[in-house]
Image (cartoon, rainbow, N blue to C red):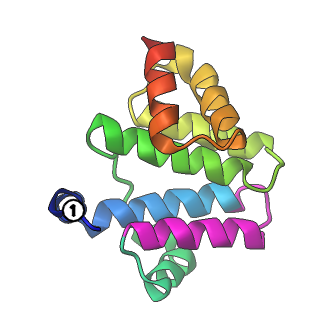
Amino acid sequence: MIKLKDILGLVSQGNGSASSHMKNLIEVAAVDGQFLDVEMNLLKTIAKRHGISDSRLQEIRKNPGAIKFEIPTGKQEKFSQLFDLVHMMSVDDQVHEEEWKLCNLFAVKFGYERSRVEELIESVKSNIQNGQSLSETMKRVEWMLG
């Protein structure tokens, strides 16, 4: 059951923020020179969660320069987007240096402390590989960064 709070959250973050997030995910997926099916499937799943249609996703992919980068607002949204980015980086079981650097860059832009970003991303990646949810991962990371 969809909660009114969730709908209002999507409306308040606007389609621009969701489009920016899709663009960021596409950049992480493509930075290693490949765009694998497993990455595209994850991208479509995340897009659906954010109310982005397949046709809009294709527009973003074809013309990423038209999408303005937006820093997510709020602690939950920042962490959720970082979680998705790290998931995209590691979904093919191969983390390329360029993907790692890009996730680091996004984490810093989102306002995470530069000196803790490596540890943060490694922790998120480990939790994803162990099948832990976004909320479980966020609790662990909050405790870790404490």
Is 7 located above or below residue 141 in the figure? below
Q: Quadrant of residue 117?
A: top right
Q: Residue at x 40, y 61 (%)?
A: 20
Q: Position of residue 27 (x, y in %)?
A: 60, 59
Q: Which residue is mark 1?
A: 3
Camera-nearest residue between 55 and 5 = 5
Above or below residue 70? Residue 115 is above
Q: Write down the quadrant of residue 120 in the picture.
A: top right
From the viewer's perspective, is 35 left or right of 25?
right
- The kind of secondary structure element at disc 1 is loop
Q: Is residue 87 left or right of residue 53?
A: right
Foreground of the two, 125 or 57: 125
Amino acid type assigned to the residue bearing label 1 in the image: Lys
Instruction: Tell me, yes or no, whether the highlighted magenta stretch contains residue 41.
Output: yes
- Residue found 55% across the figure and 37% down from its top: 105
Vertical comparison of 105 with 30: above or below: above
Which portion, as a residue range, is magenta?
A: 30-50
Q: Which image quadrant: the C terminus?
A: top left
Question: What residue occupies the far right of the structure in this picture?
Answer: 94
Number of disc labels: 1
